[in-house]
Image: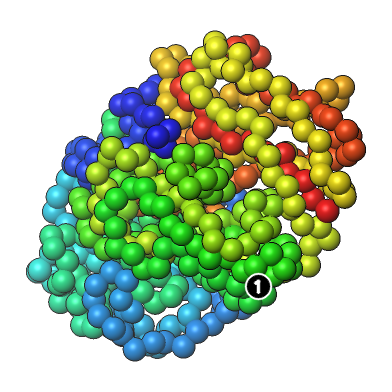
Amino acid sequence: MRRSSFTFSTLLFALGLALGCGGSSSPTDAGLDTGTADAGVDAALDASADSGTDATVDSALPTGDVCDAMGLPRAELLAGTGSAYGDVAGDFTVDTLSGDPWTLSEHFSGCESYVFLNYAAVADGDTLWASFPDRLIANAPANVHFFFTSYERDAAAARTRVEAMRTNIEDALTRVDATTAEAFRRRVHYVTTPLLDIEGSVGDRARAQSGIALAFAIARDQRFDPVGSLAQVTSVGFVSRLVMAAYPGQFYNYRAALRERLAAEPTPTVVPVMAAETVTDRIFDRPITLPDAAAMAGFDTMEFDVQITCHADARNCSEWDRIADIELCMNDACDETRELVRWITPYARPGRRRWVIDATPFLGLFVDGGARTLKVVMGPSWEAATEREVNIDMRLFHAGATDTSTDVQRAFTGGTFDATYNDLQLPFHFTPPAGTTRVELVVLISGHGQTAGDNCAEWCNHEHDFTITGHAPHHVSFDGQAGTAMGCAAKTSEGVVPGQYGNWAPGRAAWCPGLPVPARRIDITSDVDLTGDNELSYEGSFAGGAPRGGDIDLSAYVVSYH
């Protein structure tokens, strides 16, 4: 199968950072014990790429209720269900340096999340707590509370530890404006109670942990989340940093916004694909039964709701950044398929991820309804996968579109991105079906692997031109995405799973570990003869010249609507 992300051990990043490409097969491989970072390295990275606030983050709201200020819905406090990750977190109380205890039930709004940063006397614990908090302050959403706690059993030692952190943060707050500083102070809590002595759900979570957890969280749905790794790639390897604690809150806001969006959509017709299946395999053929043709004609929108949960710890959730997708089988043997949606698996991240991926252009493949077979691919067949719980549904509904996909033809696929790549891309001829009023070029594309020097095709800005004879080309490129230091971390608010045990944060060519690869939809109606033959050509390039290496995973379609 072509379904793997070809990655290698190292590359020289544009900023001079030695990045571990590809995945880490375990948390140890991901650099959880790489030693401490000196202040010079920390300062250099903080002064380099993405040193400001993520574009989608509002870290400094005016004084007042955060739910109202951010326009977020409230919720009632739920009764706790347990201390495991995924369980509803119950009430808890901590003592703090302010002198006032902090109790969840007294402050719960339902629009906020709570991240616990826990000191432990290990290399990563020392490194994390010695790192600069400036970009944590800049990039953390305003509806996230941070609790600094310590595994130290001696209360005086725990107090000294969080006092030092308060000094560190207060120093950083002198470098921001007064509004931002005050907003952050209202949501940071320095806990004097030793972590393992905390009463209530948070103490129960810590005591239930096998080993230590430098971080965990209560997300906006009031459920425990493991947060995962707080390691960032630097010139000396993977180093734990406070800035990485800014991204879980962005992800929790994404998941809450997704729940709200789905609740506001028209009631869908749901077609189960995989229903709470606990699996270790990578590839699955799943028969589905669609509504009949008359009912299918009433739908103008199709989505796939993908939920995957690893309940184990990171060492037992050890996936790499692999290509995953859902394909439609075109014959009984399923040896010919059409790719519908694509995502990239995250590195070794415990907990739950969820994406609802639009596949509306491909409704034209399902117009007859009835029995079909989908192939679900979650990585290469040769690679052992850890146990995951998988829920996948097809969602069909009418959203009021003015036209509907009625015909889908695959025009091009990818391959090895070398000097012979374009020789294999033969022109595609098509005539739109009678009654067509609009035509789209729909492209699923991502670059993988790299060659020495160019870092193509995962990290380079390769370019792709699609041309109807006699018209200007339609250009697809990744300038400003591939090779950015924190380009994928900045997309946690779009669904990138943070806290992965691997090199997840830098930007790639059209993809991120733990995120769907979006279908690029290009309206080509004005270029198309709606009643006659059309020739569509395709050419890939790098820096204005021939392809230079790696692999292009491409599915390009001509989609007709009426």
Find residue 246 and report its horizontal and vertical position in percent.
43, 56
Q: Quadrant of residue 147?
A: bottom left
Colouring scheme applied when the structure was drawn: rainbow
Q: Quadrant of residue 43?
A: top left
Secondary element at image label 1: loop
Residue 107 visible:
yes
Hey, which residue is sitting farthest front in the picture? 332
**How many numbered marks have been drawn onto this rendered protein structure?**
1
Q: As displayed, is residue 40 above or below residue 396?
A: above
Residue 15 visible:
no
Find residue 41 and report its horizontal and vertical position in percent.
34, 33
Q: Looking at the figure, which quarter contains the N terminus? A: top left
Find residue 362 and report its horizontal and vertical position in percent.
65, 51
- The kind of residue on which mark 1 rests is Glu
User: Is 561 left, or right, of 542 in this rendering?
Assistant: right
Categorize mark 1 by other alpha carbons within 10 Å: few (<14), some (14-19), many (20+): few
* Tag 1 residue: 265
Q: As displayed, is residue 35 above or below residue 113?
A: above
Residue drawn at 36 percent across, 68 percent down: 276
Residue drawn at 25 percent across, 56 percent down: 387
User: Is 343 left, or right, of 367 in this rendering?
Assistant: left
Find residue 123 and report its horizontal and vertical position in percent.
17, 45
